Amino acid sequence: GGRVNGWVLIGAALAGGAGAGLRYLVDVLVIGGRSARFPLGILVVNVTGSFALGLLTGLGAALAGTELAWVLGVGLLGGYTTFSTVSVESALLMRAGEARRGWMNALVTLVLGVAAAAAGVALGSAF
């Protein structure tokens, strides 16, 4: 149906906020306060988030269409991962004369993210 459960919407919004906070925490822990010439923290966030969403998707038989799947997938992992940050960081690297690093960031994020998602789906499907 087209009707949205208010509690699922609230849960997804709260989980999205938690995911964004977790993204910040992981990014800070990975870069460890160092000035980074490559956005490794956000790469780790997006690859782990892709794996987690793949795992959730692979577990689909048990979770498909459930309220928990919406809260975790759309909310938590939607707030955790960030395509826009990868795009901006890549563009800023290019603008700063670091075109090679900018393209590498975009390409490595795409390749590793898809591979992590595929691994997550495979693992989740095994259960």
Image: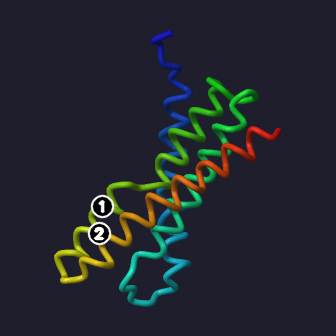
- Residue 95: which quarter of the image? bottom left
User: Residue drawn 47% across and 76% down?
Assistant: 40
User: Residue drawn 48% across and 73% down?
Assistant: 41
Q: Do tag 1 and tag 2 residues touch (Cβ < 8 Å)?
A: yes
Q: Quadrant of the C terminus?
A: top right
- Where residue 67 appears, as percent x and y from the top left, is 62, 27
> The residue under label 1 is which amino acid type?
Ser
Look at the image and name its color scheme: rainbow
- Residue 73: which quarter of the image? top right
- Where residue 80 appears, as percent x and y from the top left, is 50, 55
Q: Classify 30 as above or below 14.
A: below
Residue 90, numbered circle: 2
- Residue 11: which quarter of the image? top right
Is 83 situated left or right of 88 in this image? Answer: right
User: Residue drawn 30% across and 61% down?
Assistant: 87
Q: Nearer the viewer, residue 91 or 20?
A: 91
Alpha carbons under labels 1 and 2: distance apart: 5 Å
> The residue under label 2 is which amino acid type?
Ser
User: SS for tag 2?
Assistant: helix
Most extreme residue toward the right is: 127
User: Residue drawn 44% across and 67% down?
Assistant: 108
**Where is mark 1, residue-wise?**
87
Residue 53, numbered circle: none
- Where residue 26 appears, as percent x and y from the top left, is 55, 70
Q: Classify 91 as above or below 66.
A: below
